[in-house]
């Protein structure tokens, strides 16, 4: 069992570095193999979990005498006609059902979470929580108004409107910069997290560095010999 | 000298970007082999998240939503470990609901690999203190069903064993859940806010990946979530607050060096652009026969 765990860890590191070879920018069979293996495993896992969900709810519910699951199962089965062009129109019924339900709860909830709550959070008293609060809320309020003025397309932008739109444009640049910084931080977090899982516990470190070098050398050899592009999918 | 200067500017503008990847690999790996121990501070955001955790009392029930795939877990890992250590240490009862099929891998990665010893130390046992419901929150319909009729919609755990006789007997609707802890990538499961927070007023804390933080900040500002832990950085800060050093603090050296590298590359790229690329394109424009 321990040997199996060890081998699976080594395999995990190897397949990860095979995927990293995509950064080199040239096709090679290691990357193709790792990518397709990941897709296959992910698909298998999704199918397995979907079935588990059906079993835990519909099958067990039916066994407990809950007949309400029968129409749900029939609607679910009708969805399968999607893959048979001659009768694919049958699948429109469960799709319409799903869209109807989705619309209902979207109207009921999203209007609060995405609209009213956000507006309420913007229109707040400015002067009752100190100078930092005043500064932050002023920036938000001015930013929203000027940025919205940038998106008024049905009139000629000139005079004070032009100043406001320009101001809004620069606000957006600042926002893009902040979003990019957050994105880099997040992506670096993913990368560092992955590297940590290959470097710790400490016994993994020589294997990780060895595998990284091995994959790098194999990738270069495949590229130099021209086999990389030929064998990649 | 002048020619060398121009060549240097050209190099700054046209160097092979793959050197950047290689440097990043080296800068991330080196501090893991030989840690530097750079100091970090705790942000107000993480303090607020921690304060929210402290509102929980022993025996309280938390809906523990893992709406993340395995790759996202790598970023959320420090926050997930630190938050769950807090739950375990303080006797908070959790039921884990996966919102992504890959969550299956997290059960082993988090509970078995990272927290097993900790759970044994605090006698935190399955069925009594925590339950894994599996892929129970695939969409909003499932969340709505769970929020309005918990006993009717959830009968078994992830292995198909009945949940009768466990602490989940106390949960009838979303009103019986004391807090939602959402560990999520991207939008996560909007049903949690739409059908539990909005309807029952249940407080919700969130550990979010860096890319999706702007959306979560909006929800925090609007009061839809009450605490936000930002990416790996937030997780490492929480480790400091609960005095349980873990992977987040180890990652901070690599994190800091990675950010320095980006700043340096941005500066180099801009010098290269204004010193070479822009000049060359202006020269080409001026010599073009119109």
Image (spheres, coloured by chain):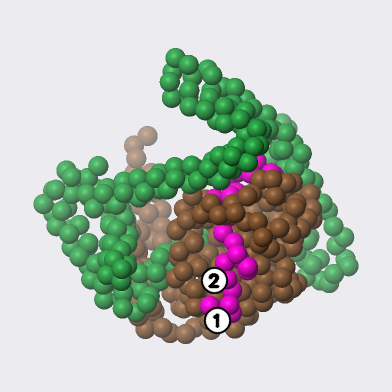
Q: Nearer the viewer, residue B118 or B204?
A: B118
Chain A display color: green
Residue B133 pos. (x, y %): 58, 55
Is the residue marked by circle 1 packed among few (<14), some (14-19), or many (20+) residues within 10 Å? Answer: few
Q: Which residue matches tag 1?
A: B121
Q: Which residues are magenta?
A: B120-145
Is the residue marked by circle 2 packed among few (<14), some (14-19), or many (20+) residues within 10 Å? Answer: many
Side (left or right) of B48 relative to A86: right
Chain B display color: brown
Q: Residue at x 75, y 42 (%)?
A: A109
Residue B43 pos. (x, y %): 65, 74
Secondary element under disc 2, as helix, strand or loop, is helix
| In the depicted structure, whether residue B138 falls above or below residue B209 | above
- Do the numbered discs 1 and 2 sit on residues whose CB atoms are within 8 Å? no
Q: Residue extending furthest top?
A: A86
Q: Please give the chain letter of the residue carrying mark 1.
A: B
């Amino acid at each position: 069992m321990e040997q199996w765990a060890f081998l699976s860890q080594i395999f995990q590191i190897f397949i990860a570095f095979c995927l990293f070879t995509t950064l080199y920018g040239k096709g090679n069979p290691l990357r193709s193999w790792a990518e397709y293996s990941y897709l296959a495993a992910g698909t298998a896992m999704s199918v397995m979990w979907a079935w588990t969900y059906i079993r835990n709810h519909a099958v067990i519910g039916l066994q407990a005498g809950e007949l309400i699951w029968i129409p749900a199962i029939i609607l679910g089965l009708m969805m399968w006609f999607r893959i048979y062009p001659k009768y694919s129109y049958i699948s429109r019924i469960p799709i319409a059902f799903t869209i109807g339900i989705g619309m209902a709860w979207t109207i009921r909830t999203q209007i609060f979470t995405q609209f009213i709550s956000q507006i309420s959070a913007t229109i707040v008293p400015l002067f009752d929580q100190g100078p930092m609060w005043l500064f932050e809320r002023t920036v938000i309020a001015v930013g929203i108004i000027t940025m919205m003025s940038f998106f008024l397309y049905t009139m000629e932008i000139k005079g004070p409107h032009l100043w406001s739109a320009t101001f809004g444009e620069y606000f957006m640049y600042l926002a893009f910069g902040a979003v990019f910084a957050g994105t880099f931080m997040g992506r670096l977090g993913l990368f560092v997290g992955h590297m940590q899982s290959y470097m710790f516990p400490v016994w993994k470190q020589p294997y990780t560095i060895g595998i990284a070098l091995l994959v790098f050398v194999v990738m270069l050899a495949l590229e130099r010999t021209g086999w990389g592009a030929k064998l990649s999918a | 000298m002048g020619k060398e200067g121009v060549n240097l500017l050209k190099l700054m503008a046209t160097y092979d970007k793959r050197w950047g990847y290689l440097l990043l690999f080296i800068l991330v790996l080196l501090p893991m082999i030989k840690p530097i121990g750079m100091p970090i501070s705790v942000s107000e955001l993480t303090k607020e998240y921690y304060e929210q955790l402290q509102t929980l009392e022993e025996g309280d029930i938390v809906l523990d939503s893992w709406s993340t795939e395995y790759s996202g877990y790598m970023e959320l890992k420090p926050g997930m470990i630190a938050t769950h250590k807090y739950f375990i240490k303080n006797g908070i009862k959790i039921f884990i609901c996966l919102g992504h099929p890959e969550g299956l891998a997290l059960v082993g990665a988090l509970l078995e690999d990272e927290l097993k010893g900790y759970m044994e130390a605090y006698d935190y046992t399955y069925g009594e203190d925590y339950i894994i419901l599996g892929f129970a929150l695939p969409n909003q319909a499932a969340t709505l069903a769970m929020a309005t009729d918990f006993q009717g919609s959830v009968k078994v755990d992830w292995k198909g064993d009945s949940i009768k006789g466990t602490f989940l007997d106390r949960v009838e609707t979303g009103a019986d859940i004391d807090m939602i802890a959402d560990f999520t990538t991207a939008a996560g499961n909007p049903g949690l806010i739409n059908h539990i927070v909005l309807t029952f007023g249940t407080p919700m804390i969130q550990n979010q990946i860096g890319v999706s933080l702007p959306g979560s900040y909006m929800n925090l500002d609007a009061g839809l979530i009450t605490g936000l832990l930002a990416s790996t950085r937030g997780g490492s800060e929480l480790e400091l607050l609960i005095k349980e050093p873990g992977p987040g603090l180890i990652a901070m050296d690599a994190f800091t060096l990675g950010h320095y590298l980006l700043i340096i590359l941005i500066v180099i790229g801009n010098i290269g652009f204004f010193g070479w690329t822009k000049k060359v394109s202006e020269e080409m424009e001026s010599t073009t026969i119109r």
